[in-house]
Amino acid sequence: LALKRMSVRKDYRGLGIATALGRTALAFARQRGCRAVVLNTLMVQHEARALYERLGFRRHRRYVLPTAYGRLANCTVTIYRYDLPADP
């Protein structure tokens, strides 16, 4: 399963929409038997990173983009992981 580019338009931010979308995505993955949800975000996406951490995602790994620009600008990607509990 893959979800790409979840975002909320600026005039609707701060209303809990992103949190609801994140929780819905986690519930969807859990219902389908996924063991974890993994996502990537750039270092400049401070609001997104804060949201993921509030939802319970943990930093899993970081790396610098493997491109000339990535190395030059030290553009770091953070991988977050949310382990889903197994059903008994």
Image: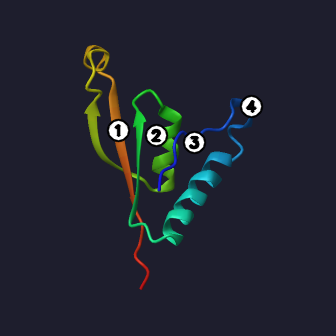
> Which residue carries the number 2 mark?
49
> Which amino acid lies under the numbered mark 4 shown in the image of this protein?
Asp
In this rendering, which labeled residue sits more in front, label 3 or label 1?
3
Q: Nearer the viewer, residue 63 or 19?
A: 63
> Which residue carries the number 4 mark?
11
**Disc 4: CA contacts within 10 A as few (<14), some (14-19) or many (>=20):** few
> Which amino acid lies under the numbered mark 1 shown in the image of this protein?
Thr
First along the sequence among labels 4 and 2: 4
Vertical arrangement, residue 72 with respect to residue 51, above or below: above
Q: Quadrant of the C terminus?
A: bottom left
First along the sequence among labels 4 and 3: 3
> Which residue carries the number 1 mark?
78
Q: Position of residue 56 (x, y in %)?
A: 45, 56
Residue 6 is marked as 3
- Asked whether the residues under the numbered discs 2 and 1 touch, taking CB atoms below 8 Å apart as contact, a structural biologist would say yes
Q: Position of residue 71 (x, y in %)?
A: 25, 19
First along the sequence among labels 1 and 4: 4
Residue shown at 54%/39% (left/top)? 5
Instruction: Find the distance from the CA under tag 1 to the CA under tag 4.
Output: 26 Å
Instruction: Find the distance from the CA under tag 4 to the CA under tag 3.
Output: 15 Å
